[in-house]
Amino acid sequence: MKTWLVLWGVIHFVVVGALYMNPFVDRIYKRFSDHPGVRKWPSITRYVATMFIGTQVEVYILAAAFFYLAPRYTLACLPLQS
């Protein structure tokens, strides 16, 4: 199970990176770069590492919630578990 969580975490990180680190979003960030609500990272390496760890934590929390709740509720898209 842990291997799948890491795999999904990496896939999630790549998808989120593609959505939020593209030229369209970059123009928006540049336009509002002086706004106090836009955080300025001193290092791109630290930014990417923080984002990677954050996405891993998010995936683990969502997976834990799923594995906790799935046996307790019957969903139309999931087979019944005995």
Image (cartoon, rainbow, N blue to C red):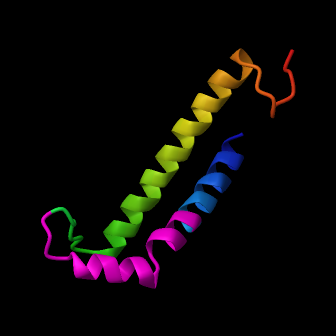
Q: Is residue 29 magenta?
A: yes
Q: Residue at x 58, y 58 (%)?
A: 12
Quick one: quadrant of the N terminus?
top right
Choose top left, top right, bottom left or bottom right for residue 43: bottom left
Choose top left, top right, bottom left or bottom right for residue 36: bottom left
- Magenta part of the chain: 15-36
Pick whichever, 40 or 22, lies toward us: 22
How far from the left and from the top, in percent, is residue 18?
53, 73
Q: Is residue 55 magenta?
A: no
How far from the left and from the top, in percent, is residue 30?
26, 82
Q: Residue at x 45, y 70 (%)?
A: 20
The rendered magenta stretch, by its main secondary structure, is classed as helix
Pick whichever, 8 or 33, lies toward us: 33
Q: Residue at x 67, y 55 (%)?
A: 7
Quick one: quadrant of the C terminus?
top right
Q: In the image, is residue 30 above or below residue 74?
A: below
Query: Is residue 16 found left or right of 67 in the rendered image?
Result: left
Pick whichever, 79 or 55, lies toward us: 79
How far from the left and from the top, in percent, is residue 14?
57, 67
Query: Is residue 10 found left or right of 21 in the rendered image?
Result: right
Q: In the image, is residue 10 above or below residue 61?
A: below
How far from the left and from the top, in percent, is residue 15?
58, 66
